[in-house]
Image: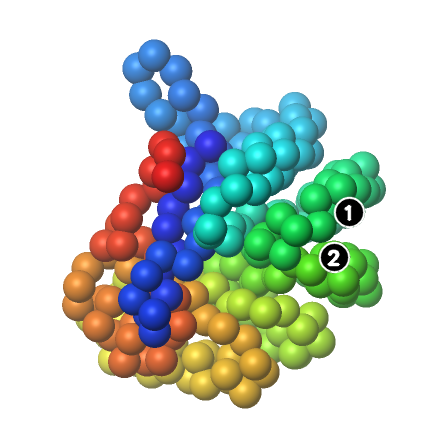
Amino acid sequence: MYYQPIFDNSANRIYKYECLVRIKNDKEIIPPNAFLPTAKKAKLYPEITRIVLRKAIKKFADLKYNFSINLSIEDIHDHETAQHIFYILRENPLVAKKITFEILEEEGIDNFNEIYTFICKLKSAGSTVAIDDFGSGFSNFEYLIKLNVDYLKIDGTLIKNMDKDEDIYFIVQNVVKIAKKLNMKTVAEFVHSEEIQKLVKSAGIDYSQGYHIDPPLADI
């Protein structure tokens, strides 16, 4: 488990940590894009999600910080994984209120009713929900309205180029305006420099995440 801070731009403090998974061996730390595709083919991916959830709850139970966990559409479709998530939330009602589940937007939504029902159950348990990587996949504003999520994480491919392309900055500004109209908080991913952080704040984005704030950490 690695943990990357998410910075509150209004309060000027770390608000939560995103829980990330790595493989660690004697020589290197292996990032998820190097092993998750293989894990999916080997049908090990659901168990990774369950392990991350259990470890994260144990880690943050007595910490002051909130935390977030990534979920794929595949996780939601997997009945056993979904039921395991709801069981863990019922067993840990106080910690459940500290969790944000980040649904990966890049994979798209092919069964709206199933996703909507899943999100409603998460929120009924006290957790919050984010759409992750918004701007990289389907970016369907109709879904965004209907899903009633709490956070919108703006994809790093947009954020990291705001200082080089005025059109991208304009797009980000308008995404933020739409999110505010829908009562969603916004998170900027891939904040890699002070210049980007200044633009993130000027665009009205609520939270920042990236190497300028801190890289993923082996411990908190």
Residue 125's tag is 2
Q: Nearer the viewer, residue 157 or 5?
A: 5
Nearest the camera: 44 or 62? 62
Question: What residue is rendered at 71% in x and 50% in y?
Answer: 93
**One can see residue 190 in this view:** no
Q: Under tag 1, what secondary structure?
A: helix
State how the image is colored.
Answer: rainbow
Vertical arrangement, residue 194 with respect to residue 74, above or below: below
Direction from residue 186 to residue 211 in the image, left or right: left
Residue under the point 32% across and 21% down:
28
Relative to 12, residue 127 above or below: above
Are the residues at dot 1 and dot 2 in contact (C-beta closer than 8 Å)?
yes
- Badge count: 2
* Residue 168 falls in image quadrant: bottom left
Q: Viewed as shown, does residue 161 lie left or right of 126?
A: left
Image quadrant occupied by the C terminus = top left
Q: Residue 102, position in %: x, y? A: 57, 55
Residue 108: where, in percent of width, then height?
Answer: 63, 59
Quadrant of the rendered image containing residue 169 = bottom left
Q: Local crowd at mark 2 within 10 Å, few (<14), some, or many (≥20)?
A: some
Frontmost residue, 163 versus 4: 4
Location of residue 119 (image quadrant): bottom right
x, y percent for residue 152: 51, 68
Q: Which mark is residue 90?
A: 1
Q: Secondary structure at mark 2?
A: loop
- Can you see residue 72? yes
Task: Find residue 197 and report its horizontal and vertical position in percent.
Answer: 24, 67
Q: Is tag 1's residue or tag 2's residue first in the polypeptide sequence?
A: 1
**Amino acid at circle 1:** Arg
Residue type beneath disc 2: Ala
Picture residue at 62% right of the left edge, 73% below the top:
144
Q: Residue furthest top?
A: 26
